[in-house]
């Protein structure tokens, strides 16, 4: 919509007009929906989930959800299955941020046309940045999205201006045979001869243009087909959709048929903003409170119709009247922000019911969550509700024996023998962090130095993950090559290339596998033994939060306790062959199967939580929490001891 106001940005003083139109068009309903989500959350979801909602609301109210994702290094696709009620506001944040700068671009382009070239170069740079940065910054950063907004502006510029003006304005009869085309402000009215508004005669070219326009419009249906019918990459689909949208809006006057003036589509266009704002919170509330995670075609259609009707009601009763009253819009924004701030501040930090069990001792690092033997079933459930909320909120803490996280170093204990030379490296991501306390406990008194070199989301063998931080990763690797640890513990999530890139042909020609093999070879040259592991189930929603929600509402746990091992195999169907290939060629590698402790002996079923204590094994949808680590400890401790003994310590 910014392109409509482009010709009005002729002076610096016109910026206020633009900001008033754009922000008062978008902000009141935005603020109301955030407030409504908070109010509903206060009464419908458990305290811990509401605390997450409150934190997300702070960013949303600051029009900066996309910035939150950038700094937390969480991609949209990682969060889409979590209970993120305001996840969809990332795009509105990017849009609002664009509107802050676009008047300057319009002003410079109109005042000094030659500056249009640098602006176009800026647009191209934005596109290149978006393509070359597949991580969170390439997705959420407003600069990475500028090319999409600017392409919309370009589509307007390429449109025939007379056709555009006939579409945008309403004719008013005048006394002298002319039509006054009334635009948004009287001073922008244009006088055109009466005959200029007569319809063009229908020719072959007219019908050809109409056919092209209908074909272009119908092309949007491609994106409704199942993925197998159109194997788009996310970037390819995004680029194609943006280009098609630009063409769609650039060709409103092609022939006698125009979907832009079609009444049903115009109606959907009118309510689209409200529909976008409310649809995602509704879906997440249905998922978190009523376990509705999938829909039949009939259920999906029914929900869509209900959302359309509710959106229409809100549009005509609230949104449309507010557009006509600036003072009322400002009041709505202020009141919504005030009440939202009160609700956010009222969210309480979860206090674990068994807080007296917290002991600053590595041997009992997780035992504060163990219920007392004398507790009744009711007390166990009450404890589990709060502890699981704590798991979801505080997914992990550094072990008590470590210093500040920035030190990345584990200090040897006082009882370490003076003659020991064992040097241990814990390498990788948050998965490695979760096994570090077990490694320290087993090797206490045996190591001279232990290092913890981890980065969020880092998979050392996968160069496709978080490429924007690759320079930092390379520095870590160069440092460890020089340090030459005796044993390396590398626990991975296997989230990105290993799992997501399909295996096409022989693994000897698979780039992802060969890259991992090359890096593994470098690690072999600088150490005596490598313990490699990880690869656990990645669920489609947070286990601890859902378990706490079910316990709070008295819902059944029967369908939630176990899941088929085949789900794990299907999820890791690309990772497993790659891991086997690398292990067969790595003489110093020992594999640890982290999934096995959570499954039965025959590996047919696996568990999400402890049935006696009702404590989740997972803090979110893929990270182990303290209870999960207790399950891993026996088998992993034995492996650590065996490996160190094998290399002579």
Image (spheres, rainbow, N blue to C red):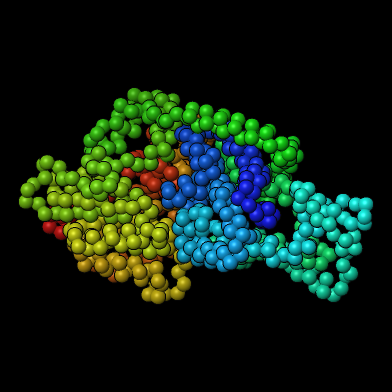
Residue at 61% over, 57% down: 106
Residue 232 image point, x, y percent: 57, 65
For this rendering, which residue is in front, 415 or 209?
Answer: 209
Image point (56%, 49%), residue name: 100
Q: Nearer the viewer, residue 531 or 248?
A: 248
Could you tell me which residue is drawn at 66 percent across and 61 percent down? 245
Q: Quadrant of the C terminus?
A: bottom left
Identify whether 147 is placed above or below 298. Answer: below
Residue 225 in the figure: left or right of residue 253:
left
Residue 13 location (% of width, % of height):
62, 47
Residue 549 image position (x, y, % from top left)? 50, 35
Question: Where is residue 172 shown, x and y percent of the image?
Answer: 87, 51
Question: Does residue 131 lie above or below 391 as drawn?
Answer: below
In depth, the one of 547 and 47 nearer the eye is 47
**Quadrant of the image occupied by residue 359:** top left
Specify the quadrant of the image occupied by residue 145: bottom right
């Amino acid at each position: 919509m910014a392109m409509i106001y482009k010709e009005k940005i002729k002076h610096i003083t016109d910026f206020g007009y633009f900001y008033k139109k754009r922000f008062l068009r978008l902000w009141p309903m935005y603020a109301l929906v955030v407030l409504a989500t908070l109010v509903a959350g206060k009464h419908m979801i458990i305290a811990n989930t509401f605390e997450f909602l409150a934190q997300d609301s702070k960013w949303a109210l600051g029009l900066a959800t996309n910035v939150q994702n950038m700094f937390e290094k969480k991609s949209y696709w990682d969060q889409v299955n979590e209970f993120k009620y305001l996840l969809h506001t990332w795009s509105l944040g990017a849009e609002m941020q664009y509107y802050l700068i676009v008047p300057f671009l319009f002003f410079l382009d109109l005042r000094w046309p030659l500056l249009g070239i640098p602006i176009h170069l800026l647009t191209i740079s934005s596109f290149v940045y978006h393509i070359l940065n597949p991580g969170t910054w390439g997705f959420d950063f407003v600069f990475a999205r500028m090319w999409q907004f600017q392409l919309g502006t370009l589509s307007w510029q390429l449109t025939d201006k007379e056709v555009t003006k006939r579409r945008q304005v309403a004719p008013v009869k005048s006394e002298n045979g002319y039509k006054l085309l009334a635009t948004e402000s009287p001073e922008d009215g244009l006088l055109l001869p009466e005959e200029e508004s007569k319809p063009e005669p229908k020719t072959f070219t007219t019908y050809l243009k109409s056919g092209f326009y209908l074909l272009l419009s119908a092309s949007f249906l491609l994106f409704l087909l199942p993925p197998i019918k159109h194997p788009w990459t996310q970037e390819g689909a995004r680029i194609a959709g943006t280009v098609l949208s630009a063409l769609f809006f650039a060709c409103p006057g092609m022939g006698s048929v125009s979907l832009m003036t079609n009444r049903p589509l115009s109606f959907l266009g009118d309510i689209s903003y409200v529909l976008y704002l409310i649809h995602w919170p509704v879906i997440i509330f249905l998922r978190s409170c009523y376990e509705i995670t999938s829909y039949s075609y009939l259920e999906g259609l029914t929900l869509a119709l209900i959302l359309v009707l509710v959106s229409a009601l809100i549009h005509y009763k609230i949104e449309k009247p507010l557009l006509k009253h600036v003072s009322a819009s400002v009041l709505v924004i202020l009141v919504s922000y005030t009440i939202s701030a009160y609700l956010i501040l009222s969210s309480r930090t979860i206090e674990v019911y068994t807080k007296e069990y917290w002991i600053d001792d590595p041997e009992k690092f997780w035992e504060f969550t163990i219920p007392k033997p004398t507790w009744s079933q009711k007390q166990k459930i009450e404890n589990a509700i709060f502890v699981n909320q704590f798991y979801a909120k505080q997914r992990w803490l550094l072990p008590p024996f470590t210093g500040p996280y920035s030190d990345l170093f584990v200090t040897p204990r006082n009882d370490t023998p003076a003659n020991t030379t064992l040097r241990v490296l814990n390498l990788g991501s948050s998965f490695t962090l979760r096994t570090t306390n077990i490694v320290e406990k087993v090797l206490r008194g045996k190591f001279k130095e232990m290092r913890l070199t981890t980065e969020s989301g880092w998979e050392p063998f996968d160069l496709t993950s978080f490429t924007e931080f690759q320079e930092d990763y390379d520095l870590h690797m160069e440092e460890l090559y020089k340090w030459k640890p005796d044993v390396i513990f590398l626990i991975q999530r296997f989230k990105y290339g290993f799992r997501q890139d399909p295996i096409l042909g022989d693994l000897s020609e698979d780039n992802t596998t060969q890259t991992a093999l090359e890096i593994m070879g470098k690690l072999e040259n600088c150490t005596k033994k490598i313990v490699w592991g990880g690869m656990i189930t990645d669920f489609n929603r947070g286990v601890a939060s859902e378990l706490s929600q079910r316990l709070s509402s008295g819902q059944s746990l029967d369908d939630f306790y176990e899941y088929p091992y085949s789900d794990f195999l299907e999820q890791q169907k690309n990772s497993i062959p790659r891991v086997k290939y690398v292990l067969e060629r790595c003489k110093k590698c020992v594999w640890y199967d982290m999934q096995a402790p959570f499954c039965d002996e025959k590996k047919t079923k696996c568990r999400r939580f402890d049935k006696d204590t009702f404590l989740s094994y997972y803090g979110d949808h893929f990270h182990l929490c303290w209870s999960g680590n207790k399950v891993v400890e026996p088998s992993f401790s034995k492996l650590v001891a065996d490996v160190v003994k094998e290399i002579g310590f």
